[in-house]
Amino acid sequence: MAFVNMKNKEVQAKIVYYGPGRGGKTTNLEYIYSKFRERIKSDMVSIKTHGDRTLFFDFLPFDIGKIMGYDVKIQLYTVPGQVKYDATRRLVLKGVDGMVFVADSQIEQRKKNILSLKNLQENLASYKKSIFKVPLVLQYNKRDLEKGGVSLLPMETLEKDLNSQLKVPSFPASAVTGENVVPTMKKIISLTMTSLQNVMK
Amino acid sequence: MGSNYDDNVSFTDYTLGQEQLERIEHILTEDLIKSGVHSALLIDMAGNIIAKCDNGNCEHDLYSLAALASANFAAVDTMAKIVGEEEFSLLFHKGESESIHFSKVNIEFLLITIFGKEVSLGLLRLKVAEAVEKINNVW
Amino acid sequence: MAYEDNISFTDYSLGQEELERIENVLEEDLIRSGVHSVLLIDMAGNIIAQRDNGDCDHDLYSLAALASANFAAVDTMAKIVGEEEFSLLFHKGENENIHFSKVNVEFLLITIFGKEVSLGLLRLKVAEAVQKINDMWNR
C-alpha cells in the first residue's frame, strides 16, 4: 500500500525484514543506517527490550532519490522475530510493499527458518496477500561464521528448504560484516519499485 | 570459534522468587480483583506475564494482550521522546463494557488492569496506585 | 483462496485537488487554533498530508510509523477484550500532547499541541476537521 502523493510528487513505500528471532534483521538495518548515515536524516527508531531484542519494530526511512519524477521514500521496518510476538509481528505487515526474509544459516536454526517462512505466509494471508505475489528477496545470513569454523547449512539446503517454490532472488550474506546487505536491499527496492510503476505514471 | 551470535536463551534482568510472586499475586487479588477489577496482569517490558489474577470470568487471550501492551507502551514512550517529552501520562483505553488501564510500576514492569463499568476510573486509579506501591515494596 | 492483486496500490486515491483541500482544512481548523503540528496518516504509517506552525522540528516520519503502530496495537487489544474499538487516544506530556482521531477505516488524524489549547477545544476542532475531510469523499 505505497502512498503516491501526486501533489508533492512523493512516494512512500514500506519494506519489511522478516525472519526467525536473532536472525539478523535489526543488524541489516543497523548496517544500512551506518553505511548511508549522511543520506538518512532521522534517527533509526528501535523498539526493543532491555535484553536488546526487537519488541515491536525497527524503523528506518530512507530517501532513494527520484524515480520517474517522484521523490521516493523507502521505509524499512523489521518485525520482532520471537514466536511469542506474533500479534505484534502481524501488525507491522500492514500495508507492506516488499519483503526481505532473513534466514539464519546455522544448522540448528533450520526448522526455525521454515516455521518463520510459513508464519509469514499465514500473516500475509490475513491481509489477503499471497507470499507468491508480494515482492520478496531471501537472505541467508551469518555466512561469516564459516570462516570461524562453524559449519553452516549449505546454500543448496537453504534454497531447497525455503526457495524451491518461491523461486525469488536470494543472497548469501553477513549482516555483521555488511556482506551483501546493500545488494539485498537494492534488489528488494528494485522489485518493489517495479511493482509500483503502474501507479506512478 | 569467533562467533558473535549468542544462543537463544535470554535471561531477564530481574529475579523473582516463589515467595515474592505469591506476595505479588496476593496484592493483585486483594487490592484489585476484590475491588471489582476483572483481570490484573503484571508484565515485564518484554511482554512476559509475571503474575496474573482474575475474577474467574475472563477468557481473554492474555499472552497476546501482554505482548501488545508492552510493545505499545514502548511505542508511546518513543513518541514522547520524539516530541521532546520525558514520558506521557498513564494510558487508559475506554470501551463500551471493558476498559484497560496501564500503569508503569518501575523500569521493568507494567501493571495492566481490565475492568468494567462497575468500577469508576477514580477508584481504579487509587487502587492501582496502592498496588503499585506495594509491589515496589516487594523488592 | 482469493488473494487481492498484490501490486501495491493504496485502497484510496487522492488527487492533487483533494490533497490541497485537506491541507487547507488542517491549516484553517487546527494550526490557526494553536495546534503545533498536524498529520493525516494512513494505517500503514504513510504521511498523507502535514501542516505545522513553522516551529516544529519533530521527526514526523518516525512519529507517523509509531502512531499507526500504536493505533493498531490498541485496536487489537480492544478486540482481545471483546470491544469493537476503544475511545480516542490521547497522550499528555509536560509541554506537548498528542491526540489521535480515527477519520475512517483508512486514515488517522494526529495532532500535537501544547498548553495553550485546551483538550475540549482541541476535540471540537478535530471533530470539525474530521467531518470536513470525510465530507470530501461522501459528496
Image (cartoon, rainbow, N blue to C red):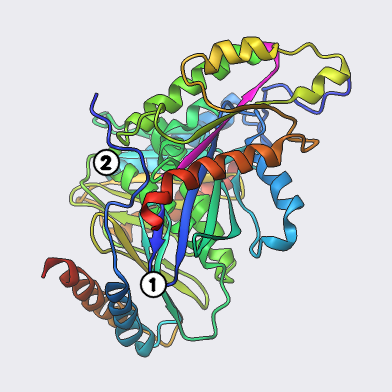
Q: Nearer the viewer, residue A30 or A22?
A: A30
* x and y percentages locating residue C67 in the rendered image: 43, 58
Residue B6 bears which disc, if any? none
Chain under callout 1: A
| Residue C120 sits above or below residue A49 on the image | below
Residue at horizontal 56%, vertical 72%? C58
Residue A157 figure quarter: top right
Q: Are there few (<14), some (14-19), or many (20+) residues within 10 Å of tag 2?
A: some
Residue A100 is one of the magenta-drawn residues: yes
Chain under callout 2: C
Q: Are there few (<14), some (14-19), or many (20+) residues within 10 Å of tag 1?
A: some
| Residue C13 sits above or below residue C85 on the image | below
In the structure shown, which secondary structural element does the residue marked by tag 2 occupy? helix
Residue at horizontal 19%, vertical 48%? B97
Camera-side mark, 1 or 2: 1
Q: Nearer the viewer, residue C134 or C76?
A: C134
Residue C126 is one of the magenta-drawn residues: no
* x and y percentages locating residue A189 in the rendered image: 56, 45
* x and y percentages locating residue A74 in the rendered image: 54, 53
| Residue C24 sits above or below residue C64 on the image | below
Residue hosting label 2: C79
The answer to whether tags 1 and 2 share a subunit is no
Q: Which residues are magenta?
A: A96-107
Compared across the picture, whether C26 is left or right of A10 comes to left
| Residue A92 sits above or below residue C86 on the image | above
Q: Nearer the viewer, residue A58 or B80?
A: A58
Residue hosting label 1: A7
Asked if marks 1 and 2 touch (Cβ < 8 Å), the reply is no
Name the quarter where the C terminus of chain A is drawn. Answer: bottom left
Q: Amino acid at mark 2?
A: Lys
